[in-house]
Amino acid sequence: MAETLRVALAGLGTVGGGVVKLLDANRDLIARRAGRAIEVVAVSARDRAKNRGVDLSRFRWVDDTWALAAADDVDAVVELIGGADGPALTLARATIGGGRHLVTANKAMLAHHGLTLAVAAEASGVALKFEAAVAGGVPVIKGLREGAAANVLTRVYGILNGTCNFILSEMEASVSAGTGRDFAEVLAEAQARGFAEADPSFDIDGVDAAHKLSILASIAFGTQPAFAAVEAHGIRQILAADIAEAAALGHRIRLIGLAEEGAGGLFQRVHPHLVPLDHPLAHVAGSLNAVVAEGNYVGRLLFQGAGAGAGPTASAVVADLIDIARGEWGPPYAMPAAALTAAAAVDSGARRGRAYLRFTVADRVGVLAEIAAAMRDAGVSIASLIQRGTSADGTVLVAIVTHEGPERSVAAALERLRGSASLAGTPLWMPLLA
Ligand code: NDP
Ligand code: HSE
């Protein structure tokens, strides 16, 4: 067997701890599959005294995380600190610059700096691997980068944030059971289970999914990662009543990241969607993630599994280490960084589709007529309209589903209603996934 692959671990939290446990548990099998042993030699985190539930005494502790990048006895550094910049980026640059392989789960860093890191890794002849950065344990990077490499991919979309899917699933269960679980309580459970980001607003405002989408889009379409071009919307505005309306319409609400290449350029957006029950994404529940990719020869591919948590994420990190041990890596984004194109961002207004609109309105004469007039004037055709009973504060919910039409018409209708005294609160718009 060839020489051991010597690994330094930076970050010993949920994922870092999981990596140590996995390498311990499956050591022999991993060595057989990799063709050589994979051993952690050095570790680093902030607090040396913290009990992490694993024996770290056998590894060299390094206080200055960046020093791992220069250690003579390290072949690959695994960055599991997190954050787009700061110590994670310093370490990543130093590791690659120093001619060592880098494995990371840090989608925020990749969304902002992936291209320059890839250029540097290619120049240094080292691996930059990030399977865990998108959909946790689901091998979707490998699936698109390798398995689907022969295809023109037209669209890639999916459920990319386990925390949001967990929250939406719990809300759904509460609606079905006729009980109500507080949003904050469900979020706290996701945090306790190790799914949520250090700043959970990244999860619930769609930023984390946008980070991941920018990585997927780059691999799928051969474009430079363009996080700034991803429109990100989250799930804060979704009410139990929306979930109930969606169910009545034969749909479930899911936060979907969707990237599509067309004549005008690349469209990238994270937004809650109504997903029809006959679509597989409607049945992805809890913290699971799922990605659909449509290829011109392979057809529709579906990748699904645990998108977060210690075990699944460690599984992806160690898979990357096994590739490195085997000598199997190539350009991080499936083609040399110099070959990635800079795609123009497509204006969402031109997109066509059906939409769900929810208004909270004053229960008085003329309100429905006002909404209908705004739709008429903007050229939006209404397919169905439901008004549900009066609440204690005298407001009612109006839920509308439109016929297919351009998004800019719906935006124009909502603009006409902006500031109307009939509306109590901001209307909610969600596309129907087609
Ligand atoms: P945690 O917050 O659990 O762990 C972060 C680790 O980094 C801790 O060990 C912490 O040290 C260490 N750390 C923080 N700041 C510094 C610093 N300045 N110098 C040295 N070490 C530092 O995060 P996770 O394990 O959840 O996530 C790690 C990465 O993996 C992130 O990029 C995240 O987005 C990504 N990821 C996480 C998933 C998950 O399910 N949790 C899934 C997919 C990706 P200490 O423990 O001493 O405080
Ligand atoms: N916070 C992320 C999620 C972790 O909830 O999906 C996995 O990337």
Image (cartoon, rainbow, N blue to C red):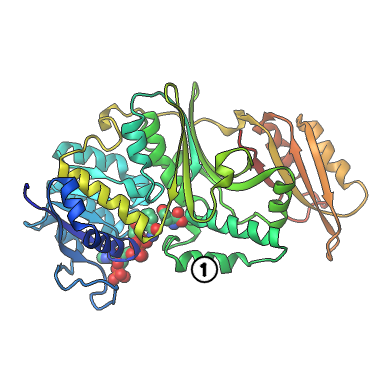
Which x, y percent locates residue 139?
36, 43
Q: Secondary structure at mark 1?
A: helix
Q: Amino acid at mark 1?
A: Ala
Disc 1: which residue:
188
In the image, taking residue 121 as reference, residue 74 lies left or right, namely left
Quadrant in which residue 23 is drawn: bottom left
Q: Is residue 306 shown above or below 13?
A: above
Q: Of 48 and 409, which appears nearest the observer?
A: 48
- Counting every numbered tag in the picture gives 1
> Splitting the image into four quadrants, where does ligand 1 fall?
bottom left
Quadrant in which residue 431 is drawn: top right
Can residue 267 be spotted in the picture?
A: no
User: Image point 6% across, 50% down: which residue?
Assistant: 3
Which x, y percent locates residue 208?
45, 51
Q: Is residue 177 shown above or below 273?
A: below
In the image, taking residue 321 as reference, residue 425 lies left or right, namely right
